[in-house]
Image (cartoon, rainbow, N blue to C red):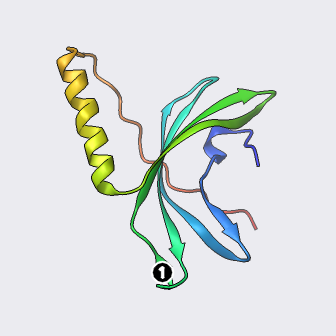
């Protein structure tokens, strides 16, 4: 399913009435024709009858003919990997002398599904 509005993009996935992938947070990192979004999500574990630990995904979309279609993604399986990626990127930007301030997007809560 493709979204016409960037705010409607989600990673949530339902199967047989069960929310298999539950989105917990969403950030729009870049807008435009090639937007980048970051998500925190949890996957349903039927054995534990609960959602597993948080996972992360970065997704790049392409707006074409009025809809956003996913072009690529990077899934980050746990908080240790997420922290390591964050620290490497921070170190590199510090070493490169990046000084411009970046406006951190506000957290976007998942939208409620229309009934």
Q: On the picture, is 74 further left or further right than 98?
A: right
- Tag count in the figure? 1
Q: Nearer the viewer, residue 73 or 12?
A: 73
Q: Quick check: 56 above or below 19?
A: above
Quadrant including the C terminus: bottom right
Question: For the point 20% across and 28% down, which residue is it?
Answer: 91
Could you tell me residue 103's position as x and y percent?
35, 29
Specify few, some or many for label 1: CA neighbours under 10 Å numbering under 14, 14-19, or 20 or more. Answer: few
Question: For the point 55% across and 40% down, which residue is it?
Answer: 73
Could you tell me residue 89's position as x and y percent?
28, 31
Could you tell me residue 48's position as x and y percent?
46, 85
Q: Which residue is mark 1?
A: 50
Q: On the picture, is 12 further left or further right than 64?
A: left
Q: Quick check: 54 above or below 106?
A: below
Q: Nearer the viewer, residue 102 or 22?
A: 22
Could you tell me residue 47's position as x and y percent?
51, 85
Question: For the point 28% across and 39% down, which residue is it?
Answer: 86
Q: Quadrant of residue 102?
A: top left
Residue located farthest toward the right when viewing the structure as drawn: 65
Q: Secondary structure at mark 1?
A: strand
Q: Nearer the viewer, residue 71 or 30?
A: 71
Q: On the picture, is 50 further left or further right than 103?
A: right
Q: Quick check: 73 above or below 19?
A: above
Q: Quick check: 10 above or below 46?
A: above
Question: For the point 25% across and 34% down, which residue is it?
Answer: 88
């Amino acid at each position: 399913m493709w979204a016409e509005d960037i705010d409607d993009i989600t990673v949530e996935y339902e199967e047989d009435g069960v929310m298999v992938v539950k989105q917990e947070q969403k950030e729009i990192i870049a807008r435009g024709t090639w937007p980048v979004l970051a998500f925190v999500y949890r996957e349903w574990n039927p054995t534990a009858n609960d959602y597993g630990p948080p996972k992360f995904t970065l997704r790049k979309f392409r707006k074409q003919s009025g809809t956003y279609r996913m072009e690529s993604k990077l899934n980050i399986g746990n908080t240790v990997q997420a922290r390591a990626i964050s620290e490497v990127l921070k170190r590199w930007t510090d070493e490169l002398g990046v000084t411009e301030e970046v406006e951190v997007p506000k957290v976007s809560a998942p939208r409620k599904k229309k009934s």
